[in-house]
Amino acid sequence: MDFYSFLYTMAHGPLLWISFLTFILGSLLRIILYVNLSRKKDKITHQHFNLKYVLMSLFRWILPLNRTVAKNPIFTILGYIFHICLIVVPIWYVGHISLWEESRFGWTWASIPDEWADRMTLVFLAIALFFLLRRIFSRDIRKISTLSDYFLLVVTALPFMTGYFLSHATLDGVPFLGDYMELIHILSGEFMLILIPFTKLSHFVLFLFSRGATAIEFGRRGYTV
Amino acid sequence: MAEDVNSREIYEFLKTRIGARFRTWLQICSHCGLCANTCHYYIANGNEPGMIPSYKVRHLLEILKRKGRVDRKYLETVYHTVYHECNMCRRCTLYCPFGIDIALMISLLRSMLFSQGIAPEGLVKAIENYKKFGNQMAVTEEDWVDTIEWCEEEMAEELLGLKIPIDKKGARIMYTVNAREPMFYPQDIMEVAKIFHVAGEDWTVPRKEGWDDTNLAMFCGDLKTARLIVENTFKRAEELEVEKIAITE
């Protein structure tokens, strides 16, 4: 077995398991650690817990119904679109669903049309590029950016870029890249999943707790949640 | 490394106070920059990137990363940031998608600096006064009562029957002031007395400590004294069995 076949087998098997389990269990662990520590050290959150404020706040911020949207409409709307594409395409792309169907789980669900997946991927990549340029060229954003901010943006965009290349055979004429695009695509997706619980990408779930804790604190003081 | 900085103490101080919220905030802040134009320091300094709220709390992460091993000079930089570039107004939090409370982190840094004896001179002096006299201006009980009685006499010439009741048990409102009022601006107390009198309000001021409603200890993160100040006021309110506490301004 050559190195490529070995990697291919790994990426389709053990690495896939490792990445999904790291993502799922890691995220669960982050939640457990948060709740545990907050019980000990953020007593204010628990003493004044108020579900109304939490839900109100999440509603406002998961949907574009908050004051930041009014203040910075362009950036925030792009941010919302970015996140929608990021979640929808990998889950509802027909190619992915058919892999789930072929897998030991045999799961299947409705897919979005290929055209949509294509367009959303391109929109996602365009916004990612905009974010990257903004980080590089905006005086403000460059000042607050860390190495990991650049790195994670690339890590997040890579599965989408390679996915597009793969499904359109864009780079098939290019040596190496053309031959290994599927492998690169899978590995890049697995890499991103593994990084989520350990980096700022964990905001996908910790955001709920951070938002909620501040909503409780601000709500009881009569501020906007 | 300067010997007057106790690295272990700094680290321990922060570690025991870093809860789930702080930890999460430090990690999930995506450096999106949406807090920038919400900060009046940022805007007032010609959109200075160094004033972006999310940038200001970098010190907290840095000190934790270095396990408290920072020198005096670094702490002075922190001092400059937390006292001269942020007044903990929390406006940035109102605009942060994650609700990251920058002001709370700045406050923690102020507390840490205070634990190392770094705080603005004026606040340190006020804290001594709070501990000794129960108010920031070192007004003695005698001077306080004298001032109130004098205010009452002055105003009674203008409004017949005006009283400033001291320690009146069972009054509806206990009124508290800024200690600068008896010291420099007694006319403020007179004006309020006038309003209460004309409104026919049942009110009183406490004789003992607890009448100063300022809490300067809070601003440098001396939470022990901050607590003492608030407790004094509540103790008086309970003793006098009042319904409400009113504060000046």
Image (cartoon, helix red, strand yellow):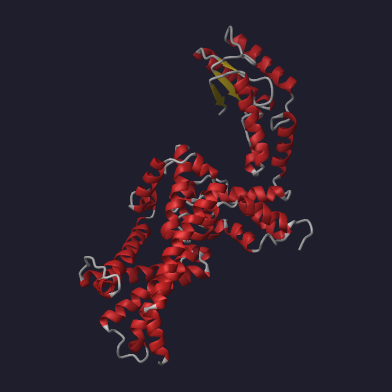
User: Residue B167 at what x, y percent from top left?
Assistant: 64, 16
* Residue at the (53%, 42%) spot, across then down: A44
Q: Which image quarter holds the C terminus of chain B? A: top right
Q: Which of A130 and B128 is in front in this view?
A: B128
Q: Which of B166 and A70 is in front in this view?
A: B166
Where is B219 relative to B113, above or below? above
Which quadrant of the structure image shows residue B246? top right
Q: From this viewpoint, which residue is outermost toward the front?
A: A104
Q: From this viewpoint, which residue is outermost toward the top?
A: B160
* Residue at the (61%, 14%) spot, across then down: B169
Q: Can residue B103 be seen in this view?
A: yes
User: Residue A50 at what x, y percent from top left?
Assistant: 43, 40
Q: From this viewpoint, which residue is outermost toward the right?
A: B3
Q: Which image quarter holds the N terminus of chain B? A: bottom right
* Residue at the (66%, 29%) spot, across then down: B180
Q: Which of A110 and B119 is in front in this view?
A: A110
Q: Nearer the viewer, residue A52 or B236?
A: A52
**Left or right: residue B33 compared with residue B143:** left
User: Residue B137 at what x, y percent from top left?
Assistant: 71, 31
Q: Is residue B46 visible?
A: no
Where is B59 relative to B129, above or below? below
User: Residue B148 at what x, y percent from top left?
Assistant: 67, 18
Which quadrant of the structure image shows residue A51? top left
Where is B125 relative to B116, above or below? above
